Every structure is written in structure tokens, then in C-alpha cells.
Image: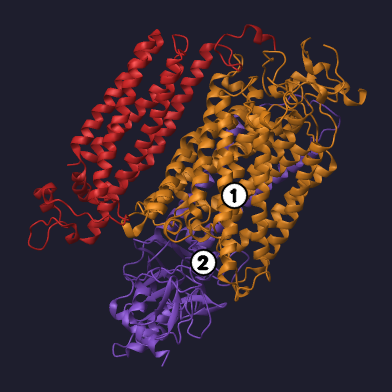
Amino acid sequence: MSSHDNHPEGVAHHFETAEQQFDSGKLGIWTFLLTEVLFFSALFVAYTMYRDNYPEVFQFASQYLDTNLGALNTLVLLLSSFTIAWGVRNAMLGETKMLTINLIITLICAAGFMVIKAEEYGHKFHEGTLWGGHEHSIFQLDASKVDPEIAAHSKAWSNPDGEFSAAVKDLDPEFRQKLGIFFGVYFCLTGLHGIHVLIGMILLTWLLIRNLRGEFGPKNFAAVDFIALYWHLVDLIWIFLFPLLYLIS
Amino acid sequence: MAPTTNTLDRTNYLNATKGFMSWFWTIDHKRLGLMYLWSVIACFIMGGFFAMKIRLNLMPGAVDFATQTAEQMNAYNNAFTVHGAVMVFLVIIPSIPAALGNFVLPLMLGAKDVAFPRLNRFSYHLWIIGALLFVATLLIGNLDTGWTFYPPYSTGHTDPSVITAVLGAFILGFSSIFTGLNFIVTIHKMRPPQMTWFKMPLFLWAIYATAVIQVLATPVIGISLLLILVEKTMQIGIFTPELGGDPVFFQHLFWFYSHPAVYIMVLPGMGIMSELFATFSRKPIFGYKSIAMSSIAIAIFSFIVWGHHMFISGQSDLMSVIFSALTFSVAVPSAIKVFNWISTMYKGSISFSVPMLYGMSIIWLFGIGGLTGLFLATLGTDVVFHDTYFVVAHFHYVMVGSALFGFIGGIYYWWPKMYGKVVDGPLAKVGCVLSFLGFNLTFLPQFVGGSKGMPRRYAAYGSEQGFDDWNYWSTMGAMVLLAGLSIALFGLLRSFFVKGALSPANPWGGVTLEWQTPSPPPEHNFEIDPPTVGDPYDMSLVEYRGEVEGFLPVNPREDDPCVAYIAPEEA
Amino acid sequence: MNMYTLLSMMLQHQKEDFFFPSQASANAATVDFIFYFIFYVSLFAFITIVLATAIFAWRYRRSKVGMTPEDSPHHSTRIEIVWSVVPSIFMVMMFWYGFEDFTERRTPPADSYEIHAKASKWQWEFEYPNGASSFGFIDAGEYQGKGLFVPLGKNVRIRLESSDVLHSFSIPNFRVKMDVVPGRYTDVWFNAIELGDFPIFCTEYCGTKHSRMLSKVHVVSEEDFAVWLKENQEDPNASPVDKGKRLFSAKCTACHAVDGSTKIGPALNGKYGTIENIVGGTVTIDDNYIRRSILDPSADIVVGFENVPMTSFAGQLSDDDISNITAYLKSLTE
């Protein structure tokens, strides 16, 4: 037990040096992010597979997503990524006040993202553009949203007269069923991503509280650094989701 | 330091603090390891209960094929599902990595703990929650999907107990991921400076390879189970054919995890084998580097062979051919390990202590398990054997014959380090031999039944189907196996509750670092630090010393506490 | 003729042996050859391992407590290469044989006679090109229905489809097996070379009565097969009651008896026109109730059967089918 007499301050009992502790944490968070990527990967595979199987359905269904709101959310998350990165810098330099401000902005962005997402979800539940097995999933579509050119190219979508129809009940039932797959994939991907944003918000709040207690500084910024990495990943996943889901054409 | 009369009277990690919370809320890897150990054993007893239920049900004459009711069939379907799910998710996957790995890994590294002790505690608590969800599953419904949870049966055609089971497996997955992550970081960052990668004990190589699989494969089963959950509760459609989904897609995701998971189960057992064969032959392990590298090779190859579970699932034939070819690539490193272990015995000085008896059993059992795998990797024969008892027998040889026997061998090997007592009597040996014989009697007949076409997961067979003899012997074997395992467990429990022969620091003559600290170790593992790091298999570094009835370093340091421990008789 | 076909011919046997049931299809012998090839290679490897372990264990047993042996080599690159490469060579052979056989087995000849097999919980239904049909499952320990009929010595391709969950179609004597996947077609083919009856198993777990999803394949001569086909062709002029009876025995008898006994579901004889207790009230069993029960079974469940939900037959039975079944059930009361 002799080594404990001169054990460095702020270093857990089982580490020899602060550097070893920080490096371990860094390797740990990177490994964790790798598992997160794999966690999402199955859904990306599902997306790729079904899009490959039903390209015209994905192209068609994508129009029911609100590209403006999606783009806004992308901007919001990018801003939050910027502020959290700045926050890490603040923590390293001991700029406690600026760190507080950056954490709060990041939190506001995260909350904003969730509000916008909730708005989108609410709209879809209202319209019934949901996954196939949902009882209210009826795909009563607004004619103004259908691009006639795409409709004309989609055999399943054209009615016998060659005109496109606005009511999905006229759709080929198989086509309608596959619309449900698109929204199934959409809700799974964005839902899982949303859960990650919520977890991120809890972690950011925890950082904020610790910062207000004055716990972070040049010698102790690991937690900020690691959570920032997590937040960047959440942001990065959205950057993939946005074009894959909203911008199919 | 004055000689102490009794190792157990000294302050050690077992008696340093007392009370329920000192265990439940501990961050000590050794205590967590022990809690995993006993929890896993409890689950093993639960899984074993269902195994016996299966075997008794299949005993010819036990159930009349003609008059079996739907309730009886459901009960059987529940039994094989719970047996499989409990044994896989709650017993074999956590057995060696979480229980023994947690206990031994930091000790082998000369470290005070794993890199993230609190995360380690969190893993254990997640594990408990997962286990409780499985228990809840038993209470709320009749889980009957098989441990594979294949849709659309699991999502659209059976009762809601799937929800708790899937949630339980999901949470257990995260427990497994965090344990693996912890081990990876610990091995990378907490080795003592003198311990280069190739001076690492082979058990650590195996645990490292296992951890890589845990971290990379488990998230995929996590998301797949989550999708089953949303499919079941909300009919999201991804796996449901009526809604345009593809049930075979689930099988790909499932086996992308579950095939590597086979190596999560087997690799640590192989690591234990390497330790046992070196120590009990008192010889450096033969072909250290090829054993280490074969662990890594197995971990890598394990990710590209999952499709061999799906040769007849409806996946494309080209994929089946590719997966068959790749599958053989896993066989080679496995074979290399077996040859290396046997060669380690050559010109050794072999002691038949209980752990070594398990080690030698594994050589034979894993031999059968591995070789029968060849029939299943080969396309032509797999079509015949798929989903028959041939497969059942094959994977029991691998999972029980290698992983479980490795686990038990490992428990006996490190038991002295855990509790400061040695269990090496004739009774424990009888337990091992009976288990070995019972195991073979149970599963050898299943190979033949399977090759004759006996399908898996059948609640009963009619006599005219001609499988009665094989089922009869299999059930008889299960009785013997039950007796053997009960004796093995009894030996441990007796040692736990009754004061048995006390153990020196190094009863078997191992050279790895965990033997360089007293048994049981102090709270922070080593009293002197850093411990001396040498070649982990240079047997000339330790010698037998009659006065401690065990082994000591040839040139012990003056302050080495192990020297001060004297034999119990002289106390 | 290469070495491989020669060997497989030498191994050809018609009778059941220790490992396998009789070789009742043309390529069964090939599979058995591959099996025995791997078996003997493995047996040799296994005996080597066992002997080496046993001999070393005896020869080098520790004679004195704590004895350290003399130094011996820790590794040998040469021997390690040998024991990596030699098994690899055998494995390449195993892969190749398996691959050849698999390719052949997965490619039905163009001239194959096609039979459709429909799997549903828990029975097989077989439809022949001329409209004849038969079915099979186990009840009370007895094979029900006529099972599958195939002609001797002809290439037969079975197209498999499932109306509910995963099943798997297996005939051990033919050494064939293929999963039946809802939402897509799969197939197997074989050429039966032995007259007789052989078991058909479902080998993918499919729920409660998975163990009873059994039938038989009857291999008959081509002449007998032609006769059988003709006899079992559906008569378009049959009465609705007869058509309904046929449908009922194919679709419903797995769960419903007509002799008053309770199987999975309630018996259906003498029920038409009576009043039945259902969950949340009573209902008169009439045409509408029967239709609803077939298409949306969980809507009105008879008291006592809440825990054994029936699957919907929507999409499997046409309106005509349903009215024929109704006519049959009606006839059971009169």
C-alpha cells in the first residue's frame, strides 16, 4: 500500500498516472463509439436492402418527409457540434464561464432538434403516413405533394388512364405495403437517433451541473472531451440520415 | 513481516469489508467476478433444470405421442426455449469472460483493477436486470420461440413473453459489451511496462480476442432484438412478410452476432486450456505465438462465416457457397490450438489435478465438436443435418464440451486464488470423470439420431419413427451428467462452507502474475508492486517448496509476502 | 467417369445403415459418400488426438511432487506448418465435394415435374399440375391425409410456400431439406429411386404442434401415379357440401374435429344454427359468423378458447371456398 502515499491527485486508485487514466478513457470512448456505429449499422443495412429492392417506393415515399424541417435540424445539430467542440477547448483552458454558455447552447440546440422532430412525427401521425402495421396507417395523400413526373414513372402509381391518382387506396396494394416499409425504416432510424439525442441531453446536463460546481479545468476535462465525441457521433449519424431519407430523387 | 499462521486470517479482499452493500455496490473486480460466478452457477442450475425436463420428456414412454396435448407440447417448447436462452445468454456467454475474466484479468496484468471499475459494476447490475427479466418471462407467459427468436413466429404468432425475453437479452448484450470494452482498455493500457504483447499470458490473448468480438458483434444483436421488440409491439413491418418485410434478413442479423458469439463462448475456454496445459505439464506452452495469433485469427474469421447457419434458409446459393468456403478458415486455427496443447504435454511432467482432468476432457470433447463441425461446414452434408439432432449434438460438444468444461476447469484452477482453499480430492475427480462419461453418453447418440433425420425441437417422437433407442441412451446419459456435475458443484460448495485444505499462494506452479500474490489476494491485489514480470510460461522461475506445500519464485524478493505464508500443518 | 463418381457408386447401398436411412433418391449416395469421406478423415484425426493425449499423459506423468521436466523445444516452425497445411488440404477437398453436390441439388432439371407444397401451421398441402391435391399432418399419433405422391424415377421439383411462419421441408430418405419462407418461393428437387413410403418432417420450429407437422411421401410407379392423379382430381361438378368437406379436411381438421371432440379448437359438428357463448356475449352460428371466424378469428372467440388464437385464412380461402365450407358445416347439423 506504500504507493498510495504519493498517489497523484485526481487519479483513481488503480491508475498509476493521470496520463494513463486519460488514455484509458479515450480508448474506452472510441471503442464505445465503434459499438454505436455497429448498433446503427443493422438499420443502415436494412435501409440499403429495402431501397435496393424497392427503389421506386423509396423515391416516392421520401416526398412525404419535410425536407425543410430536416434541413433545419441538420443546421441545428451542426451548430451544437460546433459549440460542444468549443466547449472542450474552454474546459482545457479553464474558461468555466464560456464552457457554461457553450453547454447551454448545445443543450438548447438538442432540445430544438427534438421539438422539430416531434413536430414532424406529429404531422405524420396526423396524416397517417406511418409504417405498414399501424392501424391508422392509411396513406391518404395530398395530391399537391406528388410529383407527376415520378408518379408517371411508377407503374404501380399510374392508374389505367395514365393519370396519377392522389388517393393511396388506388395504389397497387403491394406498392402500398412497401410504402409502409419505408416509413418503418424511417421511424426506426430517426427514433433510435432521437433516443441518442435524449441520452446526449442527459449527459450534457450532467456536464453543466459539474461545470457549475467548478469541477472542470485544464487538469480535468476528460468528461467534456468524451461526451463531446459522443455528441459528434450523434451529429454525424444525422448527417447520414438526412440525405438518405429526405433527399432521395 | 512476521509469518502469519493462517492465510484466511489475514486481511484480504474477502474479509476487508463486510455487509451486503460492501458486495453489491463493490467496484472490486475480484468481488464482481465472484458475484458473476455464483449468479452464473445459479442460472446454470435453472438452465439445467429445463435440460432435464427436455430429456425426461423425450425418454421413450414418458409421453404418448398419440395423446400428447397441446398444453404438454407448449410446455416442452417452453422448456427447450428457456434452456437455450438461459444457457446461452445467462450462462455460457458471461461464464468465463465475466466471472473468471473479471477475477483473473487484472491479477494477471499485475494491475489493481480493470480500467473502469464503476462501469464493471454497472455491467454486473445490467446483467442482474437482464436475468430478472428472464425470470419474469418464465412467470408471465409461455416463451416458445427457441432461443433464436425467428420472426415471423416470434413477432406475430406467439404470446407477449417474447417482449420481456428480448428485452432481457438486449440488456444482457449491453452488459457483455461493457465488459468487453473494459477488458480491451485494461489490456491495452494497464499492462506493466515489462509485459509486451508477446509476454502476455495466453488466457489474456483469448480474453482480448473475445472482447473484440463482444464489442463488435453484440451491438448488432442488440439492434436486431430491438427490432423484434418494435415489430412485436407495433408491427413495424421490417421482418413481417405480410407488410413487405423479409424474415430472412433477421436471420442474417441474428447470426452475424450469434456465430461470433460461439467464439465468445469457446475462445476463453481455449485460453484456460493453454494455462492448464502449461502449468500442469510444467512446461512452456508449445507454439506460444501460433496460439496467440490463432485466437486473433478466430476472432476475425468468426465475423465472415455467419451464413453457414443459413444454407437452406433461402439465401442465395452463391452466398452459401462462399460462406461454406470461409467457414473452413475457422477450422484451421482451432486445429492448430489442439495440436499445440497436445505437444505441450510431450516430455512434460504431467500432474492429474482436477483442472488438468477437465483440460484433457476438453481435448477429446472439442475434438469431436470441432470435427463434426466439418460435416456442417460442407454444403452437401449440412443440407441433410441442418436442424436435426446432429447439429444439437455438435454445438453441445463445442459449448458444453469446451466452454462449460473450460469454465469448470477454470473454477477449480483459480478456486485457491478465490477462496484460499484447494479442492483436489478424489471426489472432485470422480465428478469430472462422471461428467465426461455422462456427457458423451448424452450426446453421441444424438449424432446418430440426427444423421437418421431426427428433427430438433420436437415435443415427441412416434416409436415408428425409429428414434427411441437414441433418445433412451441420451436421457440415461443426461442422468449421469447430472450426477457428475452435481458432484463437481458439491466439491466446490463443501470447500466454500467447510474449512478445507488451505492454499499457498501458488498451489499448481503457475508462472503468471496472479500466483505471485497471496491466496486470497489483498484488496488491491498485490502487497508489493510492481510484481516481477517474466516469461509467463518459463517454469524454471518457480520451484516446489515443501514447507509451503506449493511453489515459490526461485529467487523470491525479500519483501515477497508469499514467502511468509507457511503451510497450514505448521500452524 | 471420374474417381469421385466411382467411389460414390462403390458406397452405394439401398438399405438403411448405421448412420442413414435408405437411399431413396438418386443423389442420396453422393451425400453419403461425402459424409463417409469426412467421417473417415475425422476418425483418423480423432484417433490420433486421443492416442497422443493418452500416450503422453501416461508416459510423462509426474512421478514426484513439483518435478520440473528437462527442457524440450517450445515450438517448431516445420511441424506447425505441417499440421496447418495438411488439414487444410483435406478441408479443401471437403468443401469441393460439398460444393459440387450442392450446386447439383440446387439446380432442378428443366424437365422436372412440378408439385406445389403449401406449408401452414401445422400441415402440408400438395397441389399437382392437374388440380389434384392432397394434404398431410399427424393427429392422435396417426398420419392424416394422403400425403405427397411422386412417380418413381422422374425428376420432381417441389415448389414451397408458406402462408404463416417459417417451416422447413425435409425428407431424410431423399437427403433433401429446404426452408419454407413466407413471402417468397423456395424449392427442392429429387429423383426417387425406391418404391415405398418415406416420412416428411417439418424441420424449422413453427409453434405448438411443430412435432406433428409430419406427412409421408409415397413413391409409386409412373402408371400408378397417373391413376392416382386422375382419381384425386377435383370434380368441378361436385356439390358445395363435397367441395366444402374437401376444403375442411385440408384446412381445418388440424384444429377442429367433426366428431364432437375438442382438439385445439372446438368441435364443429352440430353447431350450425345453435347459440354459442363467446367472449363478451353470445352469438348465433350462422353464415356470417362462420365467415367472420375464418377471416377475422379473434373477433368473436368462443369461451374456453381464448388462449389458442386461430390464424386468419384471409387470402387463402376465396368467397366460394368459404360458402362451400359453410355448406359443409350446415350439412353436419341436418
Colour that chain C carries in the picture: purple
Q: Could one spot residue B398 in this view of the protein?
A: yes
Direction from residue A182 to residue A201 in the image, left or right: right
Judged from the image, the secondary structure of the residue bearing numbered disc 2 is helix
Looking at the image, residue C107 lies above or below residue C282: above
User: Residue C317, how many percent across, how many down?
Assistant: 33, 75
Colour that chain A carries in the picture: red
- Give the residue type at disc 2: His
User: Residue B16, how many percent across, how many down?
Assistant: 73, 23
The residue carrying mark 1 is B135
The answer as to whether the residues below labels 1 and 2 share one chain is no
At label 1, counting other C-alpha atoms closer than 10 Å, the crowd grade (few under 14, some 14-19, many 20 or more) is: some
User: Residue A40, how many percent across, how many down?
Assistant: 38, 38
Could you tell me which chain the residue with mark 2 belongs to? C
Quadrant containing the C terminus of chain B is: top right
Looking at the image, residue A76 lies above or below residue A60: above
Colour that chain B carries in the picture: orange
Q: Nearer the viewer, mark 1 or mark 2?
A: 1
Direction from residue B426 to residue B476 in the image, left or right: left
Mark seen at residue B564? none
User: Residue B425, how many percent across, how many down?
Assistant: 84, 39
Direction from residue B441 to residue A163 in the image, left or right: left
